[in-house]
Amino acid sequence: MEAESEPYVRLATLRTLHRVVADLNAARSLAGTLQAVVEGAVHGLGFDAAAVSLVRPDGDLVIAAVWEIEESTFGGPSVLLGQVGSRESWDRMLQVADHWGTLRFLPYDRGWAIGTDIPTWTGDGPLPVYDNDWHPADVLLAPMYSAGGDLLGILSVDRPRSGKRPGAWTREALEMFSLQASIAIGNARLRAEMQRALARLEKEQQALRASEESFRQAFEYAPSGMAITELHGDGTGQLTRVNDALCRLLGRPRATLRQQRFVDLVHPDDLALLLRTSAEGGRAELRLSRRDGGFQWVCLRNSVVADATEGPSFLLTHVEDIEDRKRHELQLAHRASHDALTGLPNGAELRSRLARRLCSRPQLPAPGGPPDTGHPPSGAVQNGPPAPGGPVTLAHGYPPPDEALERDREAFAAGEMLRHDATAAHHVHAVVPADPSGGEPWHGHRRPGPEKGLAVLYCDLDGFKLVNDRYGHNAGDAVLIEIARRLQQVVREGDTVARMSGDEFVVLADAIGREEAKELAGRLRSAILPPMRIDNRAVRVGVSLGIGWAGCGMSIDEVLHSADERMYDEKRTRGGTARGSRGERSHRRAG
């Protein structure tokens, strides 16, 4: 090539470069590109052998491709494939070599610069005769760099077919070729990275599709109800997806449920509980309406499904049917608080209801002031601003609370129940109504008082022991059941009828005046006295009644004892069982 004229060399070189560069760009893989580089250096640039050392991620260089025009008897440079040389040794050799533009030439007499860890192969060509003859130990390197200046690899060529060290035109051709090779290698690496990225993306999409399908099947075929709720926009709270189990549980078609929200389905008494239930990890037991108008006890468990980039996407709610458990719990609670024979509230439930109605602070009138009725006086301002210059009045007409009452109000707002030792701001005090005769003291105070209060009517059956002794306990039980039925028929709506013990009943009547309480006692007596038919026998029992009054500041025992005392007063005035012979009375507890 060097013996030809300059114009001819240039034209031949351009044609050769065009062909080999086309081959470089035609390669579709990194391995194919590397192979095109070494074959192009051999067939297009007039060398007998070529090799490409590629920079690995750790910085060292590995022999990635080799080619020679004729395979040597003893394997040739192909034995170098896969061998690794350190980056430090390669850099040292490039620094010691002569700089031919971007090329590096290391003559044989500087072979000491080749590190022992750099893979080498020396051919069996002739020794040089003239200064510009090629020596078998000469090394010609073409470093290849990325657009950013990072070393991609090194192209090594050996044994020019002219037998001479490359001249200016061959060097220029090699430089141009190595530049195109570096571009091709960079593009091949980019394609390889893109292919790997696409493969990873496809794998991730397949995993996502599998995960979505798994979620869909788990959602749709779950044995308990499942719902997906919108978290953003105008549709916040909307049920966007429900499964068949939830449709069956509530008896509603899927299309109907997807037009509703849980707040549309929840029982009114459970709405506040639903609104307090947190989105993430929230749990609540409440009632949801069914299509037939009834309500279904369920346990809701929430979890937020979040997107890695956009944050919370939707709310996944698990709806478990707990109707049987709740029914069992309610049955147990009813058994614990009600008499097994009559179905009436028992003594413990009666005390619990009194405790909810009473507090430990008595309401006494201010000196010279109007009586405290426990209810807003006429004209009192409730839940509104005070009149200018007038006293500050809160709900129910109470004066502004002190710090303790303010704390109670806050506690009540937080859902706490205050009893006995504290008074919540919503509490309406129970006070003993005024006695027109003026003869009834309350806690040492004689006061005009309100007209209505909380009455406690204590009923003790007379002659019940004779029924038990004469006709047996079954007849006695039947009498108690009938008495309970009669009492419930004559009390007002909202009054409580409870069975205290064997033949003792107590009626709680709130917001009732003294005359009304006497009329109620008369109705109770009239209901009990008529004979009843038990086992084809006419059975009659009497009753002793005592009316007591409950007021805040009184203990439950004091309230019940007061009514019990008045019942005994009536029994004594009628010549009934005296207090000293209480043991003669029947206190058989049925059930």
Image: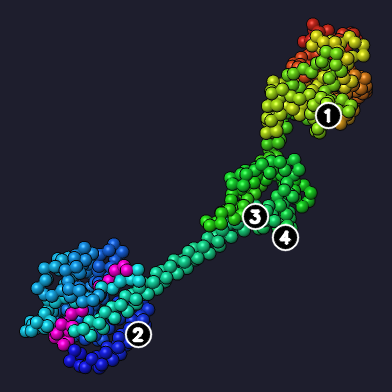
Query: Can residue 356 be seen from the camera position used here?
Result: no
Q: What residue type is labelled 4?
A: Ala
Residue 388's disc is 1
Q: Which residue is identified by label 2? A: 22
Q: How far apart are marks 1 and 4 (CA)?
A: 57 Å
Q: Distance between the residues labelled 2 and 4?
A: 63 Å
Q: Which amino acid does label 2 sit on?
A: Ala
Residue 232's disc is 3
4 vs 3, front mark: 3
Magenta range: 149-166
Which structural element holds mark 2? helix
Q: Compared to 321, does 450 lie above or below?
A: above
Residue 540 spot, x, y in % from top left = 90, 20
Q: In the depicted view, which residue is nearer to us: 234 or 559? A: 234
Is 152 colored magenta in this rendering?
yes
Which structural element holds mark 4? helix
Choose the circle earlier in sequence order: 4 or 3: 3
1 vs 4, front mark: 1
Which structural element holds mark 1? loop
2 vs 1, front mark: 1
Determine the image quadrant of residue 113: bottom left
Choose the circle earlier in sequence order: 2 or 3: 2
Which structural element holds mark 3? loop
Residue 255's disc is 4
Q: Which amino acid does label 1 sit on?
A: Pro
